[in-house]
Amino acid sequence: MLDRILDPTGLSVRPANVAVPARRLPSLAGARVGLLNNTKRNAAQLLTELGDLLRDRYGAVVTIQRTKPHVAFPVDEPTLKEIAAVSDVVITGVGDCGSCSASAAADGIAFERVGVPAAVIVSDAFEVTARAMAGVHGDENFEILLTPHPVAVLNEEQIAERATQLVADVAGRVCEPAR
Amino acid sequence: MTGGTLDAQVTDPLDGAHRSIEYMYDQGWTDGLPVVPATRELVDTFLATTSRPADEVIGRLDHLKREVSVELAAINAAMAGCRPEYFPVVLAAWDALMAERSTVGGGWQSTSGPAPLIVVNGPVRRRLGFNATGGVFGPGFRANATVARAIGLIVRNGLGVVPHVLEQATQGVPGRWAMCVAENEEESPWEPLSVDGGVAAGVDAVSTTLLRTSEFVDNRHTDDPEALLGDFADTISRTGSWIFRHASAGVVFCPEHAQMLAAAGMSKADVRDWLIERCGRSEADLARAGKNHVHGNVRRQSDDGEPGAFHRYFADGAPKNLPIVVAGARNAGISMVVRVFSNWSGISARVEPPRDGAAPAAP
């Protein structure tokens, strides 16, 4: 009887998505870092601080900084290609709203798929939606880096502090585990 | 649990109905209230009301890898409790929604948790029993209640935007998935909203826009049209709803207010022009709310600026920034300011006429 009830989701006919993680780097020394800012308040500052710390502490170099044209959507193909062409690793964020946290996870998976390891930074208030989106894009176990909510109201000093707290995790996310 | 084993257990049809309802809860397909089981036979009666093919894609969110077909919309409309003949109205409401900038962006996932206001115009209101008068914001009327609910179920099930997961509303909006009003064209002194949306008067049409809330204006206190409009301007101009340089708001006028303004010689455009000029706040008022400076397009706090400067609420007097509808009973001067999420698309969608010329009677 119950098998006569139609499924209202359309999911039964959806093709499965498979995510392909990128190879991790042996080290960040000399590595080219791309920064993808999603336009949320303080995102650009946090990414810039992280870029500076990766340079100072790990010897990486920031080669490109781009801003997403639409905060709610995953990165567009031309921007993805432009960044991937000159980056060995990418940092993106900050997921700090309903749609942008989800799309940040999709961005990370998209960069991994083209061979660029990605560190995705999301406010911890949006962890569930970011993880759900990672599942939609084929990798429900995609590792997201969380920072405490809120981010938008922090001042310059507090943003720098957040970057300091995050930088080792960012490096760990894109590099091979130390032997 | 398979259908076969259950069939063996179910001897009482009402027991079967209860089990169906629980099954659909278990699947995560409901908005919290019971839904109607959509069988092939039932859904086919919905599909028979439209000339559109079942597999036509009528909405998609590529970033969520989801799309909605006519068939999926019909399944959800059946689950929502719609009668089959409501389905062309559901499709028109959906078409109108897809013309909204926010619904094809990240609007459904937004922390602001917006909700569609659906406005029905034309003879379809009477043909299908849509309420246009007393208690127009509901509940109590099947057509109004189930069309609005169908849209919510399509977003939940078809687009996969489920609360606490991909839907991230901080609090949401009272009346979400429940706001479908028919315009009281019979007692309105003005052209229907659908005319502002590009559809001729007298043609069945649906308009939608996303709201963040609604707030009443109770004014049975004056016979001066400017004093009345001043009351609306005060409510519209609150700082809480004001995020960007400008904001939008609509008014659902009760017949009494609309008729009073029309008797003073005001058209809808005149009402809009009056409100556009006067809605807004002083720099000092906005500074007290931390919103006196515009950076990019977003309001922020600033110590600079002229305290006496006046900031206009609306960008301009286009109907898409200040949609006006007339609905409700003619029994009191009680109207509603509706807080528009971004702005109205300004596009109304036609409702497909009944097929074979047979108009079913209202229930």
Image (tube, rainbow, N blue to C red):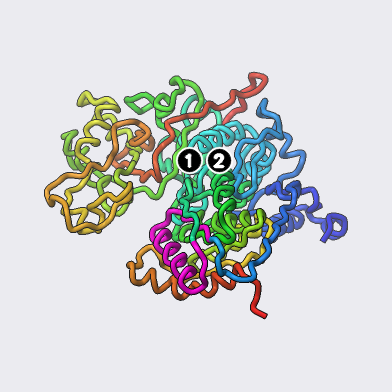
Left or right: residue B269 versus residue B7 is left
Asked if residue B242 shows in the view, the reply is: no
Describe the element under mark 2 as helix, strand or loop. Answer: helix
Counting from the top left corner in percent of width and height, residue B171 is at 44, 60
Residue found 24% across the figure and 52% down from its top? B293
Residue found 32% across the figure and 36% down from its top? B253
Picture quarter containing residue B132?
A: top left
Magenta residues (range): A33-61
Q: Nearer the viewer, residue B217 or B270?
A: B270
Picture quarter containing residue A21?
A: bottom right
Counting from the top left corner in percent of width and height, residue A154 is at 35, 67
Dot 1 crowding, Cα within 10 Å, few <14, some 14–19, many 20+: many
Kindly identify which chain the residue marked by label 2 belongs to. Answer: B
Residue A6 image label: none
Give the quadrant of the N terminus of chain B: bottom right
Is residue B286 placed above or below B269 in the rendered structure? Answer: below
For marks 2 and 1 on the same chain, the one whose residue lies earlier in the sequence: 2
Kindly identify which chain the residue marked by label 1 belongs to. Answer: B
Q: Amino acid at mark 1?
A: Cys
Q: Amino acid at mark 2?
A: Val
Residue found 42% across the figure and 31% down from its top? B346
Contact, CB < 8 Å: mark 2 with mark 1? Answer: yes
Residue closest to the far bottom: A179
Counting from the top left corner in percent of width and height, residue B81 is at 62, 44
Counting from the top left corner in percent of width and height, residue B68 is at 64, 41
Is residue B298 placed above or below A176 in the rendered structure? Answer: above
**Does residue A41 belong to the magenta stretch?**
yes
Name the residue beneath numbered marker 1. B180
Name the residue beneath numbered marker 2. B147
Describe the element under mark 1 as helix, strand or loop. Answer: strand
